[in-house]
């Protein structure tokens, strides 16, 4: 009550002297296992006093921000909003951490704070807060939790706030960033593409045209990327706004195209299409892109190419039209060999290849020209289009490589609401008697009714689970939906009648299924494997973590017995795996859609739960019996004849960490079968390293196999990844080792770590070191001893370069370490200079800002680095735009240096940029020099 009524600001300092505010409450867990957020009346008082005693409140709160209690986090944010911006800036590091942890719920208040900081011209704290709130990042997966197959992307704000507030934060930062707002938004979109896996940096493969078919607003945009779609629109709208207010088109394009990502290039094309009618510069740049073979030919650009063509072609001069028309009518603009290769893939029996080549060219031209439209085309092109339409017909949606029409899916003869009104026995009777009538393609179907059943079961799990055996003999489609509905309910925290469910599961798992492929449609399951997989999924869900509603200890053995037949299931057959696995689907993804791997995964989960319950509840007899029954089933997949399915190997890789925990001796004894020197062993190894956080336990078990994989790849061989990500098996090994090293788990002279850096291909070592820098950049509050070990690791590799023991290219990804903002400039500046000697060094637009920030304290080294980077970038103007944008500040510091050599470097940079067409460089440098000494 004292603090609730206290309104006098003079108490702030007096209470602080008595350390009253030093221990904000942390979160507590009650007897039911629920996390409770304890109020902090003292903090509420500080929030009220923030406008009255801002300095004291800011000082106190910036000192006591370590609590994990979201209630405390919200109070810190409230105080920051009530403080003057110059005092609120001290709380930004803490709020940054809260956003990273995902504990701040009110995104609007976060953006309001950004607005206040930016209005006060406090650039660094405003930008830092915006980055923490909106910059996409990959989701951290806690220990013991399986890593999702598709990489999930998150940000500091909840997704609800993200779309609503992204335009507002972009506008808020305009006073402090100006043209840099577009650079920041583009960087966020580039980051989203990379961490989501929609863009592969190594291959250049970009899937954005699938999830974002049109850059402009269009019904084909399904908007299922809750971060990606708002970012596309924010970048697009900002680029258009920049041009509308007079920013040169070339500068906007350079920002958009600096990364080379197709999605950003598509945005540039859309922007040109929108601005070309009013801008001669946009018209000229639009023509340049219409004449670019890649943009004309690649289907990823098709929609924006057609849009740009419709805007620019009518504006072209006769000579320009002639040039474009010649390229289009001779297309596709690729080699004859490439056209033949494409045609070969379309060759049908009894067809002549030359005829197919000609047809391919004609259809390609038909789609290109139709996308622009006959009414906008010049004479020859319009006539050609008319001939092609006469021959092939009018294409429906030529501007899209694929076009989605709406379809609601299988239909049910009864709504979920109507079915839910019936009792369980009536529903069971209805399922056993109802049958579709007629052959209407979109009429009511068994699959439609099954989906309705799944929803009803999930909403009434207690009733249905008690009657589970009555549903075990229904059509396999209904059985699958029944168990899936129960799994949905368990996931949502509902309790079910596990004894009855396990009895029913056993009955369904005994049904015969030969695993052969079948000619089945979408309307009904004609085999049992889908229902059997839903059983495995339910048992797996009931064994996950420490869920209170999961399988009880006394039923674990019966659960193993229910899964046992599935461990010997014929699915996947070698023929099925050859057709649908391999190059079509990686082993881990394929394992989710096949039965034996599902059984392996479920058995490993049951054993893990048995171990947990033994330790937590002392249920030793039940737990040991379940583990003793499950291990022989896994043994059957390994001995005497190993299951050669790579999907099964992936399931074992996913289970490896659990197996080591449950029975290390058993797992080590089977290492000869699990971690063989072949594709099977590669899959187990790579999936295990992808699934679990690095640990000594796992590395000790996989160490010999890891050594063999490194040696094989170093000798020119290959290693098969179990899960297709941007990390190769060798890189996964290196990633685990360097993380263990900086955590202090292994020593610098660890034999496997030493072997990796002595033997692995240089490019793999480069990517591992770069990835470590990227991880440091993504992490907050990295312990100092971790950073010390990271520096020691880098130093050891730099010394190896100097000693001639490895190539300088190993250091080529050092820019991530610089961008991480975890190391002193005095350390990274000379290391960056060393890394620049590599021909493979490519900062990818990452270094301009950090070089500008470092220039005042180290003008000489920074100017030297900038000069070398600008020279290294050569004739790639888009990629070096980031450097050019920040060059004036660096040059200004160099020219003001007392060192004549540093001044000479600054003069050379100005000359280099001036000769490169940056005619305002001298003016911009002088502007910087005139306001030198100003602070944020």
Image (cartoon, rainbow, N blue to C red):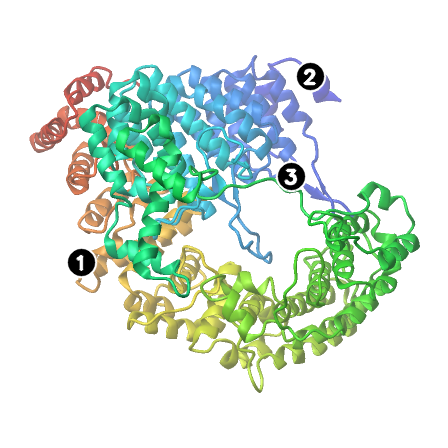
Dot label at residue 6? 2
Q: CA distance from mark 1 to mark 3?
A: 50 Å
Q: CA distance from mark 2 to mark 3?
A: 23 Å
Camera-near label (2 vs 3) is: 3
Label whose residue precedes the other's in the sequence (2 or 3): 2
- Left or right: 409 in relation to 783: right
Q: CA distance from mark 1 to mark 2?
A: 65 Å
Instruction: Locate residue 243, reporting x and y percent.
Output: 33, 19
- In the foreground, 51 or 117: 117
Residue 779 sits above or below residue 688 on the image: above
Camera-near label (1 vs 3) is: 1
Secondary structure found at label 2? loop
- In the foreground, 519 or 64: 519
Residue 91 sits above or below residue 368 on the image: above
Label whose residue precedes the other's in the sequence (1 or 3): 3
Instruction: Locate residue 99, reporting x and y percent.
Output: 53, 35
Q: Quadrant of the N terminus?
A: top right
- Left or right: 843 in relation to 600: left
Camera-near label (1 vs 2) is: 1
Residue 278 sits above or below residue 847 on the image: above
Dot label at residue 802? 1
Instruction: Locate residue 588, reporting x and y percent.
Output: 53, 63
Dots 1, 2 in contact, CB < 8 A? no
Category of crowding for the residue at label 2, using alpha-carbon neighbours closer than 10 angstroms: few (below 14), some (14–19), many (at least 20): some
Image point 38% across, 52% down: which residue?
772
Secondary structure found at label 3? loop
Secondary structure found at label 1? helix
Dot label at residue 299? none
- Asked if residue 308 shows in the view, the reply is yes
Q: Give the residue at mark 3.
A: 26
- Asked if residue 183 shows in the view, the reply is no
């Amino acid at each position: 009550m004292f603090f609730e009524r206290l309104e006098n600001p003079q108490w702030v300092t007096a209470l602080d002297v008595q350390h009253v505010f030093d221990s904000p409450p942390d979160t507590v867990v009650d007897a039911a296992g629920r996390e409770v957020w304890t109020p902090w009346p003292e903090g509420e008082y500080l929030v009220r006093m923030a406008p009255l005693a801002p300095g004291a409140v800011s000082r106190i709160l910036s000192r006591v921000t370590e609590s994990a209690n979201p209630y405390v986090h919200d109070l810190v944010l409230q105080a920051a909003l009530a403080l003057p911006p110059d005092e609120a800036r001290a709380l930004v590091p803490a709020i940054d951490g809260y956003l990273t942890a995902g504990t701040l719920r009110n995104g609007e208040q976060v953006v309001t704070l950004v607005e206040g900081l930016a209005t006060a011209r406090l650039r660094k704290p405003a930008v830092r807060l915006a980055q923490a709130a909106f910059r996409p990042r990959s989701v951290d997966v806690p220990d013991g939790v399986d890593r999702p197959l598709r990489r999930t992307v998150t940000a500091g704000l909840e997704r609800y706030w993200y779309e609503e507030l992204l335009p507002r934060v972009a506008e808020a930062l305009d006073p402090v960033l100006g043209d840099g707002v577009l650079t920041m938004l583009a960087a966020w979109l580039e980051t989203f593409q990379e961490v989501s896996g929609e863009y592969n940096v190594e291959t250049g493969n970009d899937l954005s045209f699938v999830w974002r078919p049109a850059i402009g607003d269009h019904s084909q945009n399904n908007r299922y990327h809750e971060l990606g779609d708002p970012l596309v629109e924010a970048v697009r709208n900002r680029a258009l706004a920049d041009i509308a207010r007079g920013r040169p088109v070339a500068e906007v394009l350079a920002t958009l195209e600096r990364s080379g990502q197709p999605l950003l290039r598509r945005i540039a094309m859309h922007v040109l299409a929108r601005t070309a009618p009013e801008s001669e510069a946009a018209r000229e740049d639009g023509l340049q892109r219409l004449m670019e073979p890649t943009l004309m030919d690649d289907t990823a650009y098709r929609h924006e190419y057609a849009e740009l063509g419709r805007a620019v072609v009518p504006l072209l001069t006769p000579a320009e039209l002639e040039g474009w028309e010649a390229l289009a009518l001779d297309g596709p603009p690729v080699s004859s060999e490439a056209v033949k290769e494409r045609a070969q893939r379309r060759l049908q029996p009894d067809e002549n290849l030359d005829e197919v080549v000609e047809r391919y060219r004609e259809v390609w031209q038909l789609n290109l020209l139709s996308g622009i439209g006959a009414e906008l085309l010049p004479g020859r092109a319009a006539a050609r289009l008319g001939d092609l339409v006469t021959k092939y017909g009018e294409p429906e949606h030529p501007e899209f490589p694929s076009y989605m029409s709406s379809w609601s899916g299988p239909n049910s003869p009864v709504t979920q609401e109507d079915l839910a009104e019936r009792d369980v026995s009536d529903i069971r009777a209805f399922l056993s008697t109802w049958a579709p009538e007629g052959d209407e393609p979109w009429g009511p179907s068994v699959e439609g009714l099954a989906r309705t059943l799944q929803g009803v079961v999930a909403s009434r799990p207690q009733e249905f689970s008690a009657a589970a055996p009555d549903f075990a003999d229904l059509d396999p489609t209904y059985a699958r939906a029944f168990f899936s509905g129960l799994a949905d309910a368990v996931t949502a925290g509902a309790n079910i009648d596990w004894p009855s469910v396990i009895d029913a599961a056993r009955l369904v798992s005994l049904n015969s299924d030969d695993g052969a492929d079948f000619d089945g449609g979408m309307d009904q399951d004609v085999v049992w494997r889908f229902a059997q997989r839903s059983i495995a999924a339910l048992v797996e869900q009931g064994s996950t973590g420490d869920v209170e509603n999961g399988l009880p200890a006394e039923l674990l053995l019966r659960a193993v017995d229910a899964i046992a037949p599935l461990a010997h299931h014929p699915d996947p057959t070698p023929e099925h795996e050859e057709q649908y696995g391999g190059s079509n689907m990686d082993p881990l993804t394929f394992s989710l859609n096949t039965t034996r791997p599902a059984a392996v995964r479920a058995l490993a989960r049951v054993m893990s739960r048995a171990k947990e319950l033994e330790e937590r509840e002392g249920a030793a007899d039940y737990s040991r019996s379940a583990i003793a029954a499950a291990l022989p089933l896994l043994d059957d997949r390994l001995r005497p004849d190993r299951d050669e399915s790579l999907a099964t190997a992936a399931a074992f890789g996913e289970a490896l960490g659990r197996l080591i925990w449950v029975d290390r001796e058993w797992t080590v004894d089977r290492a000869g079968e699990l971690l063989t020197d072949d594709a099977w062993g590669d899959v187990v190894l790579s999936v295990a390293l992808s699934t679990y956080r690095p640990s000594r336990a796992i590395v000790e078990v996989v160490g010999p196999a890891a050594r063999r994989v490194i040696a094989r790849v170093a000798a020119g061989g290959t290693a098969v990844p179990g899960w297709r990500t941007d990390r190769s098996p060798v890189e996964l090994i290196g990633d685990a080792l360097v993380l263990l090293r900086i955590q202090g788990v292994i020593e610098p002279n660890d034999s496997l770590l030493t072997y990796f850096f002595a033997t692995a291909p240089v490019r793999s070592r480069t990517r591992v070191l770069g990835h470590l820098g990227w991880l440091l950049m993504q992490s907050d509050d990295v312990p100092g001893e971790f950073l010390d070990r990271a520096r020691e690791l880098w130093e050891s590799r730099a010394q190896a370069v100097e000693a001639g023991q490895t190539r300088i290219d190993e250091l080529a990804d050092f820019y991530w370490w610089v961008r991480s903002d975890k190391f002193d400039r005095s350390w990274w500046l000379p290391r960056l200079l060393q890394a620049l000697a590599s021909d493979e060094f490519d900062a990818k637009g990452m270094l301009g800002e950090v070089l500008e920030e470092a220039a005042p304290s180290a003008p000489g080294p920074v100017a030297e680095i900038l000069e070398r980077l600008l020279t290294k970038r050569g004739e790639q103007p888009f990629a070096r735009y980031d450097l050019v944008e920040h060059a004036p500040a660096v040059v200004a510091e160099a020219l003001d240096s007392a060192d004549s050599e540093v001044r000479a470097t600054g003069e050379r940079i100005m000359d280099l940029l001036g000769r490169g067409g940056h005619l305002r460089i001298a003016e911009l440098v002088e502007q910087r020099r005139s306001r030198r000494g100003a602070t944020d």
